[in-house]
Image (cartoon, helix red, strand yellow):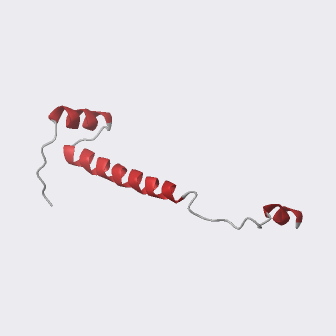
């Protein structure tokens, strides 16, 4: 799907060189994939401390059974 974007040429060229991409399209595609992965990771981090544990649960009891 062709898309026209106005992006700073120096920024694009610098990112293409650093990422060792042959084309601007390859660089933009990888950048978008990395952006998506990063946002998903942030979403997962938001889940930490979202689970309420039973204060009566004795995790050490599991160790004693062995």
Quadrant assignment for the N terminus: bottom left
Quadrant assignment for the C terminus: bottom right
* Percent coordinates x, y for residue 47 in the rendering: 52, 60
* Percent coordinates x, y for residue 38 in the rendering: 40, 51
Q: In this picture, is 49 found above or below 24?
A: below
- Give me the residue at 42% from left, 57% from top: 40
* Percent coordinates x, y for residue 17 in the rendering: 27, 34
- Give me the residue at 49% from left, 56% from top: 46
- Give me the residue at 12% from left, 44% from top: 6
Q: Which residue lies most toward the front here?
A: 55
User: How many discs appear?
Assistant: 0
Instruction: In this rendered view, identify the residue nearer to me: 35 or 54.
Output: 54
Instruction: In this rendered view, identify the residue nearer to me: 58 or 44.
Output: 58
* Percent coordinates x, y for residue 42 in the rendering: 44, 53
Q: In this picture, is 22 found above or below 62?
A: above
Quadrant housing residue 58? bottom right
Q: Is residue 20 left or right of residue 52?
A: left
- Give me the residue at 25% from left, 47% from top: 28
Instruction: In this rendered view, identify the residue nearer to me: 14 or 21.
Output: 14
């Amino acid at each position: 799907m062709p898309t026209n974007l106005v992006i700073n040429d120096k920024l694009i060229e610098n990112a293409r060189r650093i990422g060792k991409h042959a084309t601007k399209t390859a660089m933009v595609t990888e950048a978008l994939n990395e952006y998506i992965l990063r946002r998903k990771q942030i979403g997962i981090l938001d889940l930490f401390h979202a689970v309420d544990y039973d204060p009566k649960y004795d995790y050490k009891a599991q160790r004693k059974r062995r």
